[in-house]
Image (spheres, grey):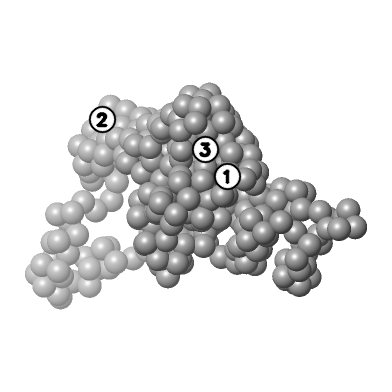
Amino acid sequence: MTSFGFGLSEIISIPSVFKENSTNSTSFTEHTVWCIDWRPSQHWMFQIANVLFFLSYSVPTSYYGILFMHSTLIAGFLILITWAWRIVCAPDLFTWNLCFLFINILQLIYLIYQRRPINFNPELEQIYRNMFKPFKITRIQFKKLVSEQFAQIVTLHIGEAYAMQNITKTDRLGLLMSGKANVLQDHQLLHPIGPCEFLDSPEFESRGSSEDKFKVSVIAATTCRYIFWQRSALEYLFVKETYLATVLATLVAKDITIKLYSMNNKIMTDKGSHLDIRLPSITPAIASKECKPPIVKTLKKLAVISSHCPISPIPAVIEHL
């Protein structure tokens, strides 16, 4: 190591050298003067390695930029390892660069693993593309949302109920993946539910206590498959995934709005016109007696919920965000 300046032993021994030669100022000056005699340039392998390091640190911090950075660092450290082992014969340089090489190899493997293709079944793929992908939700985030840890997928046959009026608790959120379901109140059809629509967004949004019950029945009109989440599971997930909580709140609010307009299309005044559901003019319109009572009750409930749509569907989560 003498050809590269002071080694560790020389640095440690400087104080003792100073004490032993305190009368000789020339000996101490040789250790402290700033680079009087510059050494010749190092081997070309050392220069190429540093050029690669320069290129790696110059790229932007995008995914492919970071991928290029780690790949270039690996090439640079490989050259430095060869240089340290074959040219300068320095085991410490060889060991340190070998450690840096392994670190960058692990980082590169992790980056490639993160970009691995994540595939869903056709039903979940449709939901992801139509609902979550426009909000920049990654496949990894969506996979966590629909994993068995937080969600369950259930099949309903014709005539089976997802929820029964005044019986089923509003402690979950269901999303229809395929098929068609009808929402009934007092045996009167309110509106249908199709794929990529929530089965119980109004009930989920408006739940006041754990004992709240559905005010409508949700019955399968065809063979249906749906995915649902327990409220407690969503609360646990959304504490960690705050952006996912915001996106789901937006989707629930949008679904409630669509249901509100769907209900409004079924209501006609005596003059043959639809109600103006733009708030706050909806309040006196709903209070009038020009509409059928069962639909008015549901529409009034949806109207109240829609006024709170910007709020997250998980009140308990908002306190943590």
Q: Residue 318, which numbered label?
A: none
The residue sitting at 66% across, 50% down in the picture is 259
Q: Is residue 208 left or right of residue 98?
A: right
Image location of residue 232, percent across then percent down: 35, 55
Q: Which residue, given by chain and number where applicable, does mark 3 sit on?
A: 219
Give the percent coordinates (x, y) of residue 7: 21, 51
Q: Is residue 99 above or below residue 213?
A: above
Q: What is the x, y in percent for residue 224? A: 51, 29
Label 3: few (<14), some (14–19) or many (≥20) C-alpha neighbours in 10 Å: many
> What's the CA distance linking mark 3 and mark 1?
11 Å
> Which element carries disc 1, helix, strand or loop?
loop
Residue position for label 1: 187
Can residue 287 be seen from the camera position used here?
yes
Pick the front one: 292 or 179: 292
- Image: 210 above or below 125: below
Q: Which is nearer the N-term, disc 1 or disc 2?
A: 2
Residue name at image x 23 percent, y 33 percent: 89
The picture places residue 189, in percent across and down from the top left corner, at: 63, 43
The amino acid type, in three-letter code, at marker 2 is: Trp
Circle number at residue 85: 2
State how far apart marks 1 and 2 are (Cα). Answer: 84 Å
